[in-house]
């Protein structure tokens, strides 16, 4: 009586696929950890920007989703900052004597908060991309693999 191997070509290709899927899942988890380790934003201004200081219409930098708005805010600040420094030169003053402030914060502080928001938007885009990738990889997980993964998670949780 001849014994046939359990590892038929079909089984071997399934093992290879399972291995690849597990490797992809690990890579997705690593990328999620990297993104998760990004620090919470540290804001230096009150993030309430107004193009007209006398207006009550403010834009909260922390929630802006449109990069064009952030660029427009920064362009407005840059124009004010450059004009201010030209005036300092014309009036024979130094920035130490009359430092630039817009709504109580320096140009550098506003720039830092705008950059912080842009970084936050980039992180969100990466998270969204990873979620889609994870969903695609999870669709490839076989029932046996899913069971093994869940078992591994339980072992880690229980200790």
Image (tube, rainbow, N blue to C red):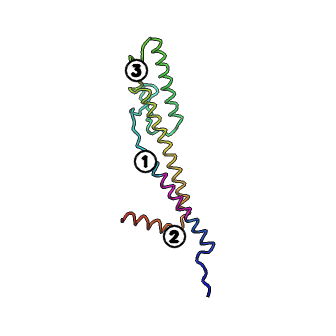
Q: Tag 1 or tag 2, which sits nearer the N-term?
A: 1
Tag of residue 50: none
The x and y percentages for residue 2 are: 62, 85
Asked whether, in this view, residue 141 is left or right of residue 45, the answer is: right
Mark 3 and mark 1: Cα distance apart in space: 36 Å
Q: Position of residue 107 (x, y in %)?
A: 44, 26
For the point 60% across and 78% down, which residue is it?
5
- Quarter of the image for the C terminus: give it: bottom left
Residue 21 horizontal/vertical position (percent): 55, 62
Q: Quadrant of residue 14?
A: bottom right
Q: Dot 2 lies on which element?
A: helix
> Please, which residue is most extreme toward the front here?
2
State yes or no: residue 30 in magenta: yes
User: Which residue corresponds to mark 2?
Assistant: 144
Spatial separation of the CA atoms under disc 2 and disc 3: 66 Å
Query: Does 157 sit above or below residue 112?
Result: below
Q: Residue at x 49, y 42 (%)?
A: 121
Q: Residue furthest left?
A: 159
- The answer to whether 5 appears left or right of 101 in the picture is right
User: Can you say whether 141 is above or below 86 in the image?
Assistant: below
Residue at disc 3, secondary structure: loop
The residue closer to the viewer here, 83 or 7, is 7
Circle 2 Cα neighbour tier, 10 Å, few/some/many (<14 / 14–19 / ≥20): few
Residue 137 belongs to magenta span: no
Q: Which residue is mark 1?
A: 37
Q: Mark 1: few, some, or many residues within 10 Å (few <14, many ≥20)?
A: few
Q: Magenta residues, as a range?
A: 19-31
Q: Which residue is mark 3?
A: 99
Name the image quarter holding the N terminus. Answer: bottom right
């Amino acid at each position: 009586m001849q014994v046939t191997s359990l590892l038929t070509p079909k089984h071997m290709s399934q093992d290879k696929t399972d291995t690849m899927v597990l490797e992809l899942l690990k890579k997705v988890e690593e990328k999620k950890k990297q993104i998760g380790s990004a620090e919470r934003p540290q804001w230096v201004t009150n993030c309430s920007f107004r193009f007209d200081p006398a207006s009550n219409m403010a834009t909260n930098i922390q929630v802006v989703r449109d990069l064009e708005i952030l660029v427009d805010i920064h362009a407005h600040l840059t124009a004010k900052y450059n004009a201010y420094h030209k005036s300092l030169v014309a009036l024979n003053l130094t920035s130490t004597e009359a430092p630039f402030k817009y709504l109580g914060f320096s140009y550098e502080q506003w720039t830092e908060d705008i950059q912080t928001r842009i970084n936050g938007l980039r992180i969100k885009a990466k998270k969204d991309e990873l979620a889609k990738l994870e969903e695609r990889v999870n669709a490839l997980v076989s029932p046996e693999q899913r069971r093994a993964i869940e078992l591994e998670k339980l072992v880690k949780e229980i200790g």
